[in-house]
Amino acid sequence: MSSDHPSRPRPFTVAVASGKGGTGKTTVAVNLAWTAARRKGRRTAYADADTEAPNGHLFLKPQIRQSRPFQTFLPEVDSDKCTLCGACGDFCRFGAIAVLGEKLTVFPDLCHACGGCILVCPVEALSEKPIELGVIETGEAGPIDFVQGRLHVGESHPAPLVRAVAEALPPVDIAVLDAAPGTSCPMVEAVSAADFVLLVAEPTPFGLSDFKLAVEAVESLRKPFGVVINRSGLGLDREIEEICARRAAPVLLRIPNERRIAEAYAEGRLLAEAMPEYRRRMEELLGKLLSYAPRTRHS
């Protein structure tokens, strides 16, 4: 799929990710975008790539200007041409197409719509069948360019839509990409589109376990990353810090476990807007992140 902005320079893109849901990933992402947009001379975009449960709009309250359907393509078999040679199944590492008995079967829930099976078919027995996965919505949240993807209920192919959300980023200076939680394909797609990854960790037993998995996923993609410890003080801060030290990954921000933060979140308020001390902390976080931006884009 080609980008909506083929000739634009790429923004410095920060993916905000986490090993599990409920760590405060979106809280960090929306506050970071709001803070970046306040810097004079820097155009900022926020993209919600958690397409199965986007919620950044609850905090940024954007004006949606455009909503367009997003289609992807799945392989369709012409049984009259197919020789059951199995080349397509050998190619597909996801097991989305296979010869079963006397029939070539496609498993849509496993397909990543890469088109490789169509290319390797020696008798051109496969073609593309369009399916609509969801919508991409764009607009503005004050000075922030806003993009989000919404997967249709019942669809199980979020990865192509996540990729399309990243490609729909407008020509800005810095983009904050709010990734899906976990370490599955949607998260990997978002992180792959980023220059830097900000992992949000929760110092609880489950949070620590999933943080380790997230670190492994980001390292396998060879992406530089830093860490935000949210709800700091819950008990396992030191373990998270030790992991970061072994990986030479900086802890860039600590957000304490405070009731007033939870209350602001429940009310859909931005911490950086409602609490001056968090505005300062987010500005410091942004400054640290921009030190990782290529000088050609952010000198």
Image (cartoon, helix red, strand yellow):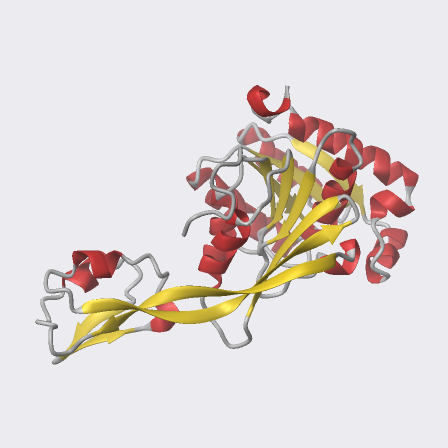
| Relative depth, front residue between 262 and 74 | 74
Is 179 displayed left or right of 279 in the figure?
left
Q: Residue at x 26, y 56 (%)?
A: 116
User: Where is residue 140 shown, x and y percent of the image?
Assistant: 73, 51
Q: Up-down: is 226 above or below 102? A: above
User: Where is residue 198 shown, x and y percent of the image?
Assistant: 62, 40
Q: How many marks?
A: 0
Quadrant housing residue 280: top right
Q: Residue furthest bottom?
A: 102
Is any part of residue 202 visible from this angle? no
User: Where is residue 15 shown, x and y percent of the image?
Assistant: 59, 43
Q: Residue at x 60, y 56 (%)?
A: 20
Q: Residue at x 19, y 62 (%)?
A: 88
Q: Up-down: is 21 above or below 144? A: below
Is 151 displayed left or right of 57 in the figure?
left
Is any part of residue 58 visible from this angle? yes
Q: Up-down: is 94 above or below 168? A: below
Q: Up-down: is 114 above or below 217? A: below
| Relative depth, front residue between 196 and 73 | 73
Is 212 displayed left or right of 47 in the figure?
left
Quadrant containing the C terminus is top right
User: Where is residue 146 shown, x and y percent of the image?
Assistant: 68, 51
Q: Residue at x 59, y 58 (%)?
A: 50
